[in-house]
Amino acid sequence: MQRRPRRGARELARAVEGGRGIGEALRHLDSFGSEPDAPVLAEALARFLVARCESHHSGWRVVRQIVVESAADPPWEKCARRAIPLVAEDLLRFSAAEGRTPLHRAQHVAARRRAEELAPHVDHAVVLGDLGLEAEWIDEDRWREAIGDAVVARSREQVARAVERSLGETVQRSSTATEPDGPLAQQVNGTQSTAS
């Protein structure tokens, strides 16, 4: 039986743009990430993965909802576009390492980059207050990292814990959140969490 010729990076990029051959494209990039056309494929994959966050990454959706509820009005589409080259660079870097890049890992890095691009447009004091946390001052890099770390969460309570871990000693529980029987304390401590 004759094997079908291997599809090149540009052909795979066109398939990815149509929502097809994602697994094959990731495998190709892992194996041939140093080839001249690899950045074309990486960018096509990045564009697909960034858009796919809305339907296939629960952590991104939770973070997005928290940002919406904070009354922030970030330029959503502009932030998404800015995430694409960063995700493409990540995919090329993964391809230079040994092993395979599974779809779930690629999807997660896309969600993280999308969240990080929101950071400059979101008032961290408001979001932290909504989560029952407070901080006197956080620099932009720390806040970007914290909001990126939060996409591991599946619930609001888990976002609070992820942000608290990321910021470490910089952040503390607000006075209302430390009341042992208060509803906000229960939310932040996860005792009312419905996360799976």
Image (cartoon, rainbow, N blue to C red):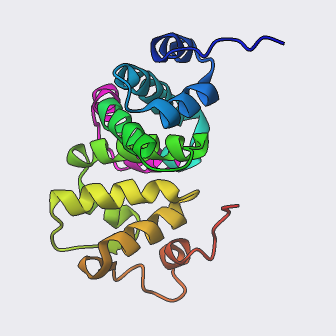
**Residue 123 position within the rendered picture, expressed as x and y whole percent measured from the top left:** 23, 53
On screen, residue 77 above or below 150: above
* Image spot of residue 173 (x, y percent): 36, 80
- The single residue placed furthest to the front in the displayed view is 1
Kindly indicate the quadrant of the structure image that contains residue 16.
Answer: top right
As drawn, is 98 to the left or to the right of 114?
A: right
State left or right for residue 188 relative to residue 134: right
Residue placed most toward the observer, 110 or 98: 98
From the image, give the main secondary structure of the stretch colored magenta: helix
Residue displayed at 33% across by 61% down: 146
- In the rendered image, the quadrant that contains the C terminus is bottom right
Residue furthest out toward the bottom: 180
State whether residue 183 is above or below residue 158. below
Residue 27 placement, left or right of 1: left
Tell whether 162 sits left or right of 173: right
**For the magenta stretch, what is the residue range?**
62-83
Magenta segment includes 165: no
Please tell me whether residue 81 belongs to the stretch shown in magenta: yes
- Looking at the image, is 31 positioned above or below residue 102? above
Which residue: 15% across, 70% down? 137
- In the rendered image, the residue lying farthest to the right is 1
Rendered residue at 53%/16% (across/down): 12
The residue shown at (51%, 34%) is: 31
Image quadrant occupied by the N terminus? top right
Q: Position of residue 21 (x, y in %)?
A: 63, 21
The residue nearer to you, when weighing 157 against 175, is 157
